[in-house]
Amino acid sequence: MMQIVPLRPDFLITIEIYCMTVGDSDSISEASVSSLAGD
């Protein structure tokens, strides 16, 4: 069941830019994954 939560447009843009940055840079992607995993 999906619940619609209103988000600020600038917050959505920040997520988009972050996703694009992670997708473009392998080093940033690896660092993000390891930090999320707790390494």
Image (cartoon, grey):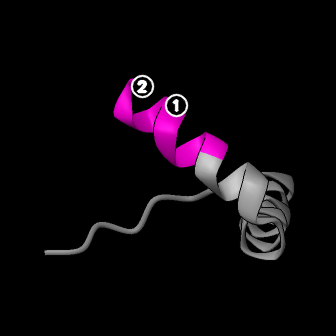
In the image, taking residue 35 as reference, residue 10 lies left or right, namely right
> What range of the chain is rendered magenta?
31-39
Left or right position of 28 against 4 = right
From the viewer's perspective, is residue 26 above or below residue 23?
Answer: above
Amino acid residing under circle 1: Ser
> Residue sitting at 29 percent across and 66 percent down?
3
Residue 23 visible? The answer is yes
Within-10-Å neighbours for mark 1: few <14, some 14–19, many 20+: few
Q: Is residue 15 visible?
A: no
Contact (CB < 8 A) between labels 2 and 1? yes
> From what the image shows, is residue 34 above or below residue 1?
above
Is 4 displayed left or right of 31 in the figure? left
The amino acid pointed to by label 2 is: Asp
In the rendered view, would you say 38 is above or below 34? above
| Residue found 82% across the figure and 55% down from its top | 14
Quadrant location of the N terminus? bottom left
Q: Position of residue 11 (x, y in %)?
A: 76, 52
Query: Which numbered tag is attached to residue 39?
Result: 2
Residue that appears at 66% across and 57% down: 29
**Residue 31 figure quarter:** top right
Choose between 15 and 29: the one closer to the eye. 29
The answer to if 37 sits in the magenta stretch is: yes
Mark in front: 2 vs 1: 2
User: Is 29 left, or right, of 33 in this rendering?
Assistant: right
| Dominant secondary structure (helix, strand or loop) of the stretch shown in magenta | helix
Vertical comparison of 17 with 23: above or below: above
> Which residue is at a point 85% across and 65% down the rendered structure image?
17
Marking on residue 35? 1
Q: How many marks?
A: 2
